[in-house]
Amino acid sequence: MAAVTVWNENQHERATGPADAMYPDGIHATLAKILLSYGHTVRTATLGDPDHGLTDQALAETDVLLWWGDVAHDAVSDAVADRVERAVRDGMGFIPLHSSHESKPFESLMGTTGVLRRREEGEREHVWVVEPSHPITDGLPAEFELERAEIYGKRFDLPVPDTLITVSWCDDGTVFPSGCCYRRGAGRVFYFQPGHETFPVYYQPVVQQLLHNAVTWAAPSESNGPSVGEC
Ligand code: ZN
């Protein structure tokens, strides 16, 4: 089991409204509870904490960092974003969720902007597992549905993933690469698109299983990093 830090900007949920109603203690608290139930050690951190809760020591004690950001990407200090990027390259697992595709650490790790098309109307999203032998999809059905989701569409300004795990499809035919694996230095990165703040995506057991699998996959191991061996 991994030592996990769940980071959330925690902006939508602090105002009374649909996000607060869906995730009353914040998305970070919901994600923490899920991962605790699978046996991981979990702490949470938010934008409002000193150093956003991501000091050198906190990152050194983190195997896998989950990141949820949306409206406050620019409020994340460059120093903290750089610290996260370095930690990933040194071996920490990193799982940016949903609108974190435009977060500072993810952008700098990818070298792209992460911009995409989006539509927030609570439509049905079909998530297809396209890599059933991958550890992140272990125990998942071949396809599952999210009854209400924010739909993302291509073009998605990300590098082609090392491994594409899931592809999402909307009833109007929109398709999107919703589960993307990357390696950066010694660190493993998994971007997962579902998870809008006003829709109950993180309450679905199949999504919870996938997140647990992703944490397990992204946790550092001896074999993660590139090795030059001996001449
Ligand atoms: Zn959203």
Image (cartoon, grey):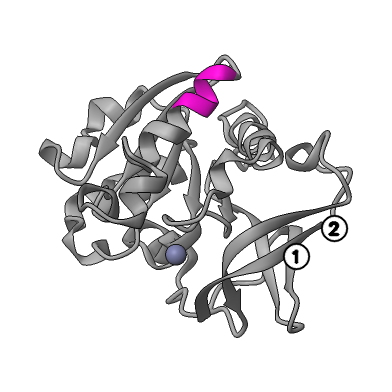
- Can residue 188 be spotted in the picture? no
> Which SS type dominates the magenta stretch?
helix
On the image, numbered disc 2 is attached to which residue?
A: 130
How packed mark 2 is, by other alpha carbons closer than 10 Å (few <14, some 14-19, many 20 or more), is: some
Q: Residue at x 47, y 52 (%)?
A: 96
Q: Secondary structure at mark 2?
A: loop
Q: Nearer the viewer, residue 115 or 62?
A: 115
Q: Residue 84's quadrant in the figure?
A: top left
* Residue type, label 1: Val
Q: Residue 128's quadrant in the figure?
A: bottom right
Residue 141 in percent (x, y) is at 86, 44
Q: Secondary structure at mark 1?
A: strand
Q: Is residue 60 above or below residue 154?
A: above
On the image, numbered disc 1 is attached to which residue?
A: 167
Ligand 1 quadrant assignment = bottom left
Residue 206 in percent (x, y) is at 71, 40
Q: Residue at x 46, y 79 (%)?
A: 115
Q: Residue 17's quadrant in the figure?
A: bottom left
Residue 36 belongs to magenta span: yes
Q: Quadrant of the N terminus?
A: top right
Q: Which residues are magenta?
A: 33-37
Q: Residue at x 69, y 34 (%)?
A: 209
In the shown orientation, is residue 210 left or right of residue 194? right
